Image (cartoon, rainbow, N blue to C red):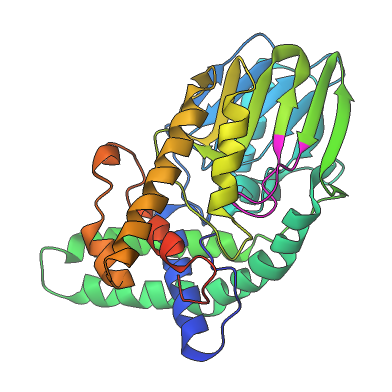
Amino acid sequence: MDEDNTMFKGGCMKKHIFISVLIALFSGIGGLLMADENHIVEKVNDHLYVIQGLGGNISFLITDEGVFLIDMGNSRKDGETVLEEIRRITDKPLIYVFLTHYHGDHVNGMAALPVHVPVIATEHTLENLKNITTPNRAYNIKEAYPAAIKDLKEKAQKDSTDSEKAARELKEMQKRFEAYKNESVRYPDEIFETRRTLRVGDFTVELFLPGPAHTGGNAMAFIKEMNVLITGDNLFHNDFPYIDIRGGADPYHWITIAREHSKKGYDIIIPGHGPVAKGTEALARFADYLEYAANEVRKAKEDGLTEDEAVEKITMEPYTHLGKARFRENNIRVFYNIGVASCI
């Protein structure tokens, strides 16, 4: 979810939550049932596949022992689709699910997961699920969804060119709301602090937390025999990233992590969003972007610009080709307020 790291009181907190929830509802980063029916399944090699278009990227490793799944998509429907796609390729049982982090576009699909399949995540991800996701779901059900539906109803009733569009959106929103109310948050069954190594069939899978980056608990997976790194949202490939301060993000440490792993010599990197990358150049370019954003904001502050003026002035000109442009503002505001209590 798009959240700030500090729990604010009064209007600041309400403003922050409402804006965060609206971004989640309409952009999908928060995972509120924004499935893409045009998802694709990409074969990386004979054992490793990636599903794109169901929220964050979803990976699964097929071994003689069974299937190791990483993340599950945006909704129960997405989770069902993930399980169906796995069954199309193999009849091996699903033996583990690893959650890279707590954001809904990676975890909401667990609503479709059989209860006997164990879920693994970091301690920080468990804390985020308990302290952010669970209360936010209550808020979404009580206030955010009803407010969004009310707004669409009013637009649909107006005699304007937008009324037909609003009516379609209203119908879809009501459908999402009904599905959302019938889902619940599943917490991981097995947690680790910084590192856990699993032997899955003939493959060694190293799960590790590199430190705060996209969130405080976004862990990555390294498949040793393939020299493949699965980053979760610690890499947005060809997209502006979302910096989740409330979830424990640290954009400066994120730069360090991206730089460090860009020098590791991985053959393949599977990002949390965007296409699968050969080699490590995608990580190096991502670190370049974060450094550029930080420097642009620093210069704006030195020039005496307010936060809103910085948002207006900083266009990220060399990076306007990136997707998820709605996160440009988030990036500017985070770097502007880093270390400062503010409604980001």
Residue drawn at the location 42% of the way across and 67% of the way down: 22
Compared to 277, does 202 lie above or below?
above
**Residue sitting nearer the eye, 288 or 29:** 288
- Classified by dominant secondary structure, the portion drawn in magenta counts as loop
Q: Residue at x 43, y 37 (%)?
A: 288
Magenta includes 212? yes
The image position of residue 105, as x and y in percent, is 56, 48
Q: Quadrant of residue 45?
A: top right
Residue at figure coordinates x 46%, y 50% from the top left: 34
In the image, residue 192 lies at what x, y percent? 85, 47
Q: Looking at the picture, does residue 20 appear above or below residue 274?
A: below
Residue occupying the point 32% across, 60% down: 169
Which segment did they paint magenta? 208-220
Q: Residue furthest front?
A: 302
On the rendered image, what quadrant is the C terminus found in? Answer: bottom left
* Residue 316 percent across, percent down from the top left: 28, 47
Residue extending farthest to the top is: 46
